[in-house]
Image (tube, rainbow, N blue to C red):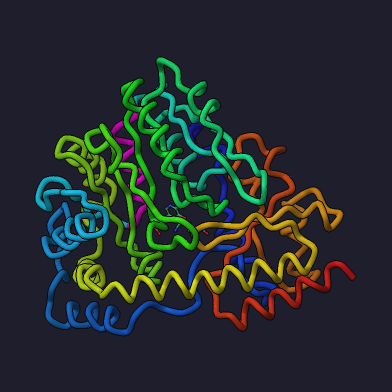
Amino acid sequence: LNRRLAEFGTTIFAEMSALAVRTGAINLGQGFPDTDGPEEVREAAVRALRDGRGNQYPPGPGVPELRTAIADHQLKRYGLTYDPDTEVLVTAGATEAIAASLLALVEPGDEVIALEPYYDSYAASIALAGGTRVPVTLRPHDGAYHLDLDELRDAVTPRTRLILLNTPHNPTGTVLTRDELAAVAALAVERDLLVVTDEVYEHLVFDGEHLPLATFPGMRERTVTISSSGKTFSFTGWKVGWVTATPELVTTVRAAKQFLTYVSAGPFQYAVAEALRLPDSYFADLRDDLRTKRDVLSAGLAAAGFEVYRPAGTYFVTTDIRPLGESDGFAFCRSLPERCGVVAVPNAVFYDHRDQGAPFVRFAFCKRTEVLTDAANRLKTLAS
Ligand code: PMP
Ligand code: GLN
Protein backbone atom coordinates (compact mmCIF):
# COMPACT_ATOMS: atom_id res chain seq x y z
CA LEU A 1 0.00 0.00 0.00
CA ASN A 2 1.24 3.49 -0.77
CA ARG A 3 1.70 6.02 1.99
CA ARG A 4 -1.71 7.57 1.47
CA LEU A 5 -3.48 4.26 2.09
CA ALA A 6 -1.06 2.62 4.51
CA GLU A 7 -3.27 3.17 7.56
CA PHE A 8 -6.31 1.60 5.91
CA GLY A 9 -6.36 -2.18 5.82
CA THR A 10 -9.49 -4.24 5.29
CA THR A 11 -12.65 -2.35 6.23
CA ILE A 12 -14.23 -3.29 9.52
CA PHE A 13 -17.42 -4.22 7.65
CA ALA A 14 -15.68 -6.87 5.56
CA GLU A 15 -13.80 -8.15 8.60
CA MET A 16 -16.91 -8.43 10.75
CA SER A 17 -19.12 -9.92 8.02
CA ALA A 18 -16.43 -12.55 7.38
CA LEU A 19 -16.37 -13.27 11.11
CA ALA A 20 -20.16 -13.71 11.07
CA VAL A 21 -19.97 -16.14 8.15
CA ARG A 22 -17.12 -18.09 9.76
CA THR A 23 -18.84 -18.42 13.13
CA GLY A 24 -22.46 -18.56 12.02
CA ALA A 25 -23.23 -15.66 14.37
CA ILE A 26 -26.10 -13.20 13.84
CA ASN A 27 -24.60 -10.33 11.85
CA LEU A 28 -25.56 -7.00 13.40
CA GLY A 29 -22.27 -5.54 12.18
CA GLN A 30 -22.37 -4.38 8.57
CA GLY A 31 -25.47 -2.32 7.86
CA PHE A 32 -27.60 -4.06 5.27
CA PRO A 33 -31.23 -5.19 5.46
CA ASP A 34 -31.97 -8.92 5.59
CA THR A 35 -35.09 -8.35 3.51
CA ASP A 36 -34.88 -6.98 -0.03
CA GLY A 37 -36.76 -3.88 -1.15
CA PRO A 38 -40.12 -3.74 -2.97
CA GLU A 39 -40.93 -6.40 -5.52
CA GLU A 40 -42.12 -3.79 -8.02
CA VAL A 41 -38.73 -2.08 -7.91
CA ARG A 42 -36.98 -5.38 -8.52
CA GLU A 43 -39.39 -6.02 -11.39
CA ALA A 44 -38.49 -2.62 -12.84
CA ALA A 45 -34.83 -3.68 -12.94
CA VAL A 46 -35.75 -6.96 -14.61
CA ARG A 47 -37.85 -5.10 -17.19
CA ALA A 48 -35.01 -2.71 -17.96
CA LEU A 49 -32.61 -5.62 -18.40
CA ARG A 50 -35.07 -7.49 -20.60
CA ASP A 51 -35.93 -4.45 -22.70
CA GLY A 52 -32.31 -3.57 -23.24
CA ARG A 53 -32.40 -0.32 -21.28
CA GLY A 54 -29.00 0.36 -19.78
CA ASN A 55 -27.31 -2.82 -20.93
CA GLN A 56 -24.72 -0.72 -22.76
CA TYR A 57 -22.88 2.26 -21.28
CA PRO A 58 -25.47 4.71 -20.00
CA PRO A 59 -24.73 8.46 -20.23
CA GLY A 60 -21.91 9.60 -17.92
CA PRO A 61 -24.10 11.80 -15.70
CA GLY A 62 -26.73 9.04 -15.37
CA VAL A 63 -29.82 8.14 -17.39
CA PRO A 64 -32.18 11.11 -17.88
CA GLU A 65 -35.11 9.23 -16.28
CA LEU A 66 -33.17 8.89 -13.03
CA ARG A 67 -31.75 12.40 -13.04
CA THR A 68 -35.26 13.76 -13.49
CA ALA A 69 -36.62 11.53 -10.72
CA ILE A 70 -33.86 12.75 -8.36
CA ALA A 71 -34.59 16.39 -9.17
CA ASP A 72 -38.33 15.79 -8.67
CA HIS A 73 -37.63 14.09 -5.34
CA GLN A 74 -35.56 17.05 -4.07
CA LEU A 75 -38.31 19.44 -5.10
CA LYS A 76 -41.22 17.44 -3.72
CA ARG A 77 -39.60 16.55 -0.40
CA TYR A 78 -37.54 19.63 0.34
CA GLY A 79 -38.52 22.40 -2.07
CA LEU A 80 -35.03 22.31 -3.59
CA THR A 81 -34.86 23.00 -7.32
CA TYR A 82 -32.15 21.23 -9.33
CA ASP A 83 -31.81 21.09 -13.10
CA PRO A 84 -31.64 17.38 -13.99
CA ASP A 85 -29.31 18.12 -16.90
CA THR A 86 -26.69 20.20 -15.14
CA GLU A 87 -27.17 19.79 -11.39
CA VAL A 88 -27.57 16.05 -10.86
CA LEU A 89 -24.90 13.36 -11.17
CA VAL A 90 -25.54 9.63 -10.73
CA THR A 91 -22.71 7.72 -9.04
CA ALA A 92 -21.78 4.15 -8.09
CA GLY A 93 -23.34 4.45 -4.65
CA ALA A 94 -22.77 7.24 -2.19
CA THR A 95 -19.29 5.82 -1.67
CA GLU A 96 -18.21 6.93 -5.13
CA ALA A 97 -19.97 10.26 -4.72
CA ILE A 98 -17.95 10.91 -1.57
CA ALA A 99 -14.66 9.84 -3.15
CA ALA A 100 -15.25 11.77 -6.37
CA SER A 101 -16.28 14.91 -4.46
CA LEU A 102 -13.17 14.87 -2.32
CA LEU A 103 -10.82 13.96 -5.19
CA ALA A 104 -12.25 16.79 -7.25
CA LEU A 105 -12.48 19.49 -4.58
CA VAL A 106 -9.54 18.93 -2.21
CA GLU A 107 -5.97 20.05 -2.96
CA PRO A 108 -3.09 18.23 -1.28
CA GLY A 109 -2.64 19.76 2.16
CA ASP A 110 -6.18 21.10 2.40
CA GLU A 111 -7.95 20.40 5.65
CA VAL A 112 -11.27 18.58 5.64
CA ILE A 113 -13.42 18.71 8.77
CA ALA A 114 -15.40 15.56 9.47
CA LEU A 115 -17.67 14.66 12.36
CA GLU A 116 -16.07 11.96 14.49
CA PRO A 117 -16.96 9.09 14.73
CA TYR A 118 -16.97 9.16 10.92
CA TYR A 119 -18.03 6.63 8.31
CA ASP A 120 -14.84 4.79 7.36
CA SER A 121 -14.70 5.76 3.70
CA TYR A 122 -14.41 9.44 4.63
CA ALA A 123 -10.95 9.01 6.10
CA ALA A 124 -9.75 6.93 3.15
CA SER A 125 -11.21 9.32 0.57
CA ILE A 126 -9.69 12.35 2.26
CA ALA A 127 -6.35 10.51 2.26
CA LEU A 128 -6.67 9.55 -1.41
CA ALA A 129 -7.25 13.22 -2.20
CA GLY A 130 -4.11 14.15 -0.26
CA GLY A 131 -6.13 16.12 2.28
CA THR A 132 -5.71 16.29 6.03
CA ARG A 133 -8.67 15.21 8.11
CA VAL A 134 -9.67 17.31 11.06
CA PRO A 135 -12.12 15.43 13.25
CA VAL A 136 -14.73 17.22 15.33
CA THR A 137 -15.96 14.79 17.94
CA LEU A 138 -19.63 14.17 18.66
CA ARG A 139 -19.97 13.53 22.37
CA PRO A 140 -22.49 11.40 24.22
CA HIS A 141 -24.57 12.99 26.91
CA ASP A 142 -28.19 12.75 28.03
CA GLY A 143 -28.62 9.46 26.19
CA ALA A 144 -27.57 10.69 22.73
CA TYR A 145 -24.65 12.17 20.77
CA HIS A 146 -24.32 15.90 20.24
CA LEU A 147 -22.28 18.26 18.09
CA ASP A 148 -20.32 20.93 19.96
CA LEU A 149 -20.65 24.00 17.76
CA ASP A 150 -17.76 25.79 19.46
CA GLU A 151 -15.49 22.87 18.67
CA LEU A 152 -16.62 22.95 15.07
CA ARG A 153 -15.96 26.67 14.85
CA ASP A 154 -12.52 26.26 16.43
CA ALA A 155 -11.61 23.54 13.93
CA VAL A 156 -11.80 25.95 10.98
CA THR A 157 -8.41 27.31 9.90
CA PRO A 158 -7.21 29.18 6.81
CA ARG A 159 -6.40 25.74 5.33
CA THR A 160 -9.93 24.41 5.73
CA ARG A 161 -11.34 23.54 2.33
CA LEU A 162 -14.58 21.92 3.27
CA ILE A 163 -16.74 20.35 5.93
CA LEU A 164 -17.82 16.77 5.33
CA LEU A 165 -21.14 16.49 7.12
CA ASN A 166 -23.32 13.43 7.72
CA THR A 167 -26.91 13.61 8.90
CA PRO A 168 -28.59 11.30 9.88
CA HIS A 169 -25.24 10.22 11.26
CA ASN A 170 -23.58 6.81 11.02
CA PRO A 171 -22.66 5.31 13.52
CA THR A 172 -24.34 7.37 16.28
CA GLY A 173 -27.83 7.72 14.79
CA THR A 174 -27.78 11.43 15.56
CA VAL A 175 -29.98 13.65 13.39
CA LEU A 176 -28.67 17.21 13.38
CA THR A 177 -31.31 19.71 14.50
CA ARG A 178 -32.43 22.83 12.71
CA ASP A 179 -30.35 24.98 15.08
CA GLU A 180 -27.24 22.87 14.61
CA LEU A 181 -27.58 22.91 10.84
CA ALA A 182 -28.23 26.65 10.84
CA ALA A 183 -25.01 27.12 12.81
CA VAL A 184 -23.04 24.92 10.39
CA ALA A 185 -24.51 26.90 7.50
CA ALA A 186 -23.67 30.26 9.08
CA LEU A 187 -20.11 29.10 9.70
CA ALA A 188 -19.71 27.88 6.12
CA VAL A 189 -20.96 31.19 4.76
CA GLU A 190 -18.85 33.25 7.15
CA ARG A 191 -15.64 31.32 6.39
CA ASP A 192 -16.50 30.71 2.73
CA LEU A 193 -16.38 26.92 2.98
CA LEU A 194 -17.89 24.22 0.83
CA VAL A 195 -19.87 21.49 2.54
CA VAL A 196 -20.18 17.95 1.27
CA THR A 197 -23.17 16.46 3.06
CA ASP A 198 -23.87 12.74 3.17
CA GLU A 199 -27.62 12.28 3.56
CA VAL A 200 -27.98 8.60 2.64
CA TYR A 201 -30.25 8.00 5.66
CA GLU A 202 -32.53 10.92 4.77
CA HIS A 203 -35.65 8.73 4.84
CA LEU A 204 -34.70 6.84 7.99
CA VAL A 205 -35.54 9.40 10.66
CA PHE A 206 -37.65 8.20 13.60
CA ASP A 207 -37.66 11.26 15.86
CA GLY A 208 -37.64 14.76 14.44
CA GLU A 209 -37.12 15.36 10.73
CA HIS A 210 -34.37 15.34 8.15
CA LEU A 211 -33.41 18.81 6.98
CA PRO A 212 -31.07 18.95 4.00
CA LEU A 213 -28.25 21.40 4.58
CA ALA A 214 -28.78 22.84 1.10
CA THR A 215 -32.12 24.30 2.24
CA PHE A 216 -30.40 26.75 4.63
CA PRO A 217 -29.68 30.34 3.59
CA GLY A 218 -26.57 30.71 1.47
CA MET A 219 -26.03 26.95 1.27
CA ARG A 220 -27.47 25.82 -2.03
CA GLU A 221 -24.51 27.31 -3.90
CA ARG A 222 -21.86 25.85 -1.61
CA THR A 223 -23.28 22.40 -0.80
CA VAL A 224 -22.65 19.08 -2.50
CA THR A 225 -25.54 16.86 -1.38
CA ILE A 226 -25.04 13.11 -1.57
CA SER A 227 -27.61 10.38 -1.25
CA SER A 228 -28.14 6.81 -2.36
CA SER A 229 -30.84 4.29 -3.17
CA GLY A 230 -29.25 1.60 -1.02
CA LYS A 231 -30.90 2.46 2.31
CA THR A 232 -34.05 4.13 1.02
CA PHE A 233 -35.08 1.14 -1.07
CA SER A 234 -33.28 -1.71 0.72
CA PHE A 235 -31.12 -2.66 -2.25
CA THR A 236 -27.64 -1.95 -0.90
CA GLY A 237 -26.11 -4.21 -3.56
CA TRP A 238 -27.31 -2.08 -6.44
CA LYS A 239 -24.93 0.78 -5.72
CA VAL A 240 -26.90 3.63 -7.25
CA GLY A 241 -26.09 6.94 -5.58
CA TRP A 242 -26.16 10.57 -6.58
CA VAL A 243 -24.95 14.10 -6.14
CA THR A 244 -27.01 17.29 -6.38
CA ALA A 245 -25.21 20.64 -6.50
CA THR A 246 -24.66 23.70 -8.70
CA PRO A 247 -23.59 23.14 -12.32
CA GLU A 248 -20.02 24.19 -11.43
CA LEU A 249 -19.77 21.74 -8.54
CA VAL A 250 -21.43 18.90 -10.45
CA THR A 251 -19.08 19.42 -13.39
CA THR A 252 -16.13 19.33 -11.02
CA VAL A 253 -17.25 16.15 -9.27
CA ARG A 254 -18.04 14.54 -12.62
CA ALA A 255 -14.48 15.20 -13.77
CA ALA A 256 -13.28 12.81 -11.05
CA LYS A 257 -16.18 10.33 -11.37
CA GLN A 258 -15.58 9.78 -15.08
CA PHE A 259 -12.15 8.30 -14.34
CA LEU A 260 -13.25 6.25 -11.36
CA THR A 261 -16.12 4.28 -12.89
CA TYR A 262 -17.05 6.34 -15.95
CA VAL A 263 -20.70 5.34 -15.46
CA SER A 264 -22.80 3.33 -13.01
CA ALA A 265 -24.73 0.15 -13.86
CA GLY A 266 -27.54 0.97 -16.30
CA PRO A 267 -30.61 -1.19 -15.62
CA PHE A 268 -30.63 -0.38 -11.89
CA GLN A 269 -30.79 3.32 -12.70
CA TYR A 270 -34.14 2.83 -14.46
CA ALA A 271 -35.43 0.84 -11.50
CA VAL A 272 -34.35 3.48 -8.98
CA ALA A 273 -36.03 6.15 -11.13
CA GLU A 274 -39.29 4.27 -10.62
CA ALA A 275 -38.58 3.68 -6.94
CA LEU A 276 -38.18 7.40 -6.26
CA ARG A 277 -41.77 7.81 -7.46
CA LEU A 278 -43.22 5.29 -5.00
CA PRO A 279 -46.15 6.71 -3.00
CA ASP A 280 -45.51 8.51 0.29
CA SER A 281 -46.88 5.48 2.13
CA TYR A 282 -43.82 3.47 1.04
CA PHE A 283 -41.44 5.91 2.73
CA ALA A 284 -43.64 6.17 5.84
CA ASP A 285 -43.90 2.37 6.17
CA LEU A 286 -40.14 1.92 5.80
CA ARG A 287 -39.54 4.47 8.53
CA ASP A 288 -42.17 3.10 10.88
CA ASP A 289 -40.93 -0.45 10.44
CA LEU A 290 -37.34 0.55 11.22
CA ARG A 291 -38.49 2.60 14.22
CA THR A 292 -40.09 -0.52 15.68
CA LYS A 293 -36.89 -2.45 15.01
CA ARG A 294 -34.85 0.24 16.67
CA ASP A 295 -37.06 -0.02 19.72
CA VAL A 296 -36.91 -3.83 19.84
CA LEU A 297 -33.11 -3.95 19.64
CA SER A 298 -32.59 -0.97 21.96
CA ALA A 299 -34.80 -2.53 24.62
CA GLY A 300 -32.98 -5.85 24.22
CA LEU A 301 -29.58 -4.20 24.56
CA ALA A 302 -30.67 -2.25 27.63
CA ALA A 303 -32.04 -5.44 29.19
CA ALA A 304 -28.71 -7.14 28.46
CA GLY A 305 -26.93 -4.44 30.46
CA PHE A 306 -25.60 -2.10 27.76
CA GLU A 307 -25.96 1.65 28.03
CA VAL A 308 -27.90 2.56 24.90
CA TYR A 309 -27.65 5.88 23.04
CA ARG A 310 -30.99 6.41 21.45
CA PRO A 311 -30.61 6.86 17.68
CA ALA A 312 -33.03 9.35 16.06
CA GLY A 313 -32.28 7.86 12.64
CA THR A 314 -30.21 5.40 10.52
CA TYR A 315 -29.82 1.62 10.81
CA PHE A 316 -27.63 1.73 13.92
CA VAL A 317 -27.64 1.93 17.68
CA THR A 318 -24.46 2.79 19.55
CA THR A 319 -23.93 1.34 23.01
CA ASP A 320 -21.46 1.75 25.86
CA ILE A 321 -20.12 -1.61 27.07
CA ARG A 322 -18.70 -0.32 30.36
CA PRO A 323 -21.78 -1.27 32.41
CA LEU A 324 -20.96 -4.87 31.40
CA GLY A 325 -17.52 -4.50 32.95
CA GLU A 326 -15.86 -4.18 29.52
CA SER A 327 -13.85 -1.29 28.14
CA ASP A 328 -12.24 -2.40 24.86
CA GLY A 329 -14.79 -2.46 22.03
CA PHE A 330 -12.37 -4.16 19.64
CA ALA A 331 -11.69 -7.08 21.95
CA PHE A 332 -15.37 -7.24 22.84
CA CYS A 333 -16.48 -7.45 19.19
CA ARG A 334 -13.84 -10.01 18.29
CA SER A 335 -14.92 -12.29 21.14
CA LEU A 336 -18.67 -11.68 20.89
CA PRO A 337 -19.44 -14.36 18.24
CA GLU A 338 -17.83 -17.02 20.40
CA ARG A 339 -19.32 -15.76 23.63
CA CYS A 340 -22.90 -15.39 22.45
CA GLY A 341 -23.22 -15.72 18.67
CA VAL A 342 -23.63 -12.05 17.69
CA VAL A 343 -21.48 -9.77 15.53
CA ALA A 344 -21.21 -5.99 16.13
CA VAL A 345 -18.80 -3.23 15.14
CA PRO A 346 -16.37 -1.41 17.46
CA ASN A 347 -16.88 2.34 17.08
CA ALA A 348 -13.17 2.98 17.72
CA VAL A 349 -12.52 2.32 14.02
CA PHE A 350 -14.46 5.50 13.26
CA TYR A 351 -12.20 7.68 15.42
CA ASP A 352 -8.80 9.34 15.08
CA HIS A 353 -8.93 9.62 18.85
CA ARG A 354 -9.33 5.87 19.27
CA ASP A 355 -9.31 6.06 23.04
CA GLN A 356 -12.45 8.20 22.87
CA GLY A 357 -14.25 5.53 20.89
CA ALA A 358 -12.89 2.53 22.80
CA PRO A 359 -15.91 1.53 24.93
CA PHE A 360 -18.55 2.05 22.23
CA VAL A 361 -20.03 -0.66 20.05
CA ARG A 362 -22.51 -0.35 17.19
CA PHE A 363 -25.35 -2.77 16.44
CA ALA A 364 -27.43 -2.70 13.23
CA PHE A 365 -31.20 -3.11 13.59
CA CYS A 366 -32.11 -3.32 9.86
CA LYS A 367 -33.02 -6.99 10.38
CA ARG A 368 -36.22 -9.01 10.77
CA THR A 369 -37.75 -8.61 14.22
CA GLU A 370 -37.32 -12.29 15.07
CA VAL A 371 -33.60 -11.98 14.30
CA LEU A 372 -33.35 -8.95 16.60
CA THR A 373 -35.21 -10.78 19.36
CA ASP A 374 -32.95 -13.80 18.96
CA ALA A 375 -29.86 -11.55 19.11
CA ALA A 376 -31.19 -9.77 22.20
CA ASN A 377 -31.75 -13.09 23.96
CA ARG A 378 -28.22 -14.20 23.13
CA LEU A 379 -26.77 -10.92 24.39
CA LYS A 380 -28.63 -11.34 27.67
CA THR A 381 -26.46 -14.39 28.42
CA LEU A 382 -23.40 -12.11 28.58
CA ALA A 383 -24.26 -10.84 32.03
CA SER A 384 -24.57 -14.32 33.53
N1 PMP B 1 -22.45 7.04 3.76
C1 PMP B 1 -22.86 6.48 4.90
C2 PMP B 1 -23.03 7.32 6.11
C3 PMP B 1 -23.11 5.11 4.94
O1 PMP B 1 -23.50 4.54 6.09
C4 PMP B 1 -22.91 4.34 3.79
C5 PMP B 1 -23.07 2.86 3.88
N2 PMP B 1 -24.04 2.37 3.23
C6 PMP B 1 -22.53 4.98 2.60
C7 PMP B 1 -22.29 6.32 2.64
C8 PMP B 1 -22.31 4.25 1.33
O2 PMP B 1 -23.45 4.16 0.57
P1 PMP B 1 -23.50 3.32 -0.79
O3 PMP B 1 -23.73 1.90 -0.43
O4 PMP B 1 -24.60 3.92 -1.55
O5 PMP B 1 -22.17 3.50 -1.46
N1 GLN C 1 -22.77 1.55 5.44
C1 GLN C 1 -22.77 0.25 5.99
C2 GLN C 1 -22.35 0.30 7.45
O1 GLN C 1 -22.01 1.32 7.96
C3 GLN C 1 -21.86 -0.72 5.29
C4 GLN C 1 -21.19 -0.28 4.06
C5 GLN C 1 -19.96 -1.06 3.78
O2 GLN C 1 -19.89 -2.25 3.98
N2 GLN C 1 -18.95 -0.38 3.31
O3 GLN C 1 -22.37 -0.72 8.07
Is 80 left or right of 171, judged from the image as shown? Answer: left
State the image coordinates of residue 355 (x, y, percent, origin top left).
Answer: 72, 38
Q: Name which quarter of the figure residue 67 lies in.
A: bottom left
Is 94 left or right of 310, judged from the image as shown? Answer: left
- Taking the view exactly as shown, the residue that stands out farthest to the top is 158
State the image coordinates of residue 345 (x, y, percent, origin top left).
Answer: 64, 57
Overall secondary structure of the magenta section: helix
* The quarter of the picture showing ligand 1: bottom left
Quadrant the C terminus occupies: bottom right
Give the total of numbered labels.
0
Residue at position x 32%, y 31% in the image: 194
State the image coordinates of residue 223 (x, y, percent, origin top left).
Answer: 29, 38
Residue at position x 36%, y 25% in the image: 161
Q: Name which quarter of the figure residue 156 lies in.
A: top left
State the image coordinates of residue 24 (x, y, percent, origin top left).
Answer: 67, 77
Pick the residue in front: 344 or 323: 323
Does the stretch in magenta take in 103?
Answer: yes
- Taking the view exactly as shown, the residue that stands out farthest to the right is 384
Does the stretch in magenta take in 272?
Answer: no
Residue at position x 49%, y 59% in the image: 207
Q: What's the magenta region?
A: 93-106
Q: Name which quarter of the figure residue 302 lies in.
A: bottom right
Pick the residue in front: 179 or 86: 179
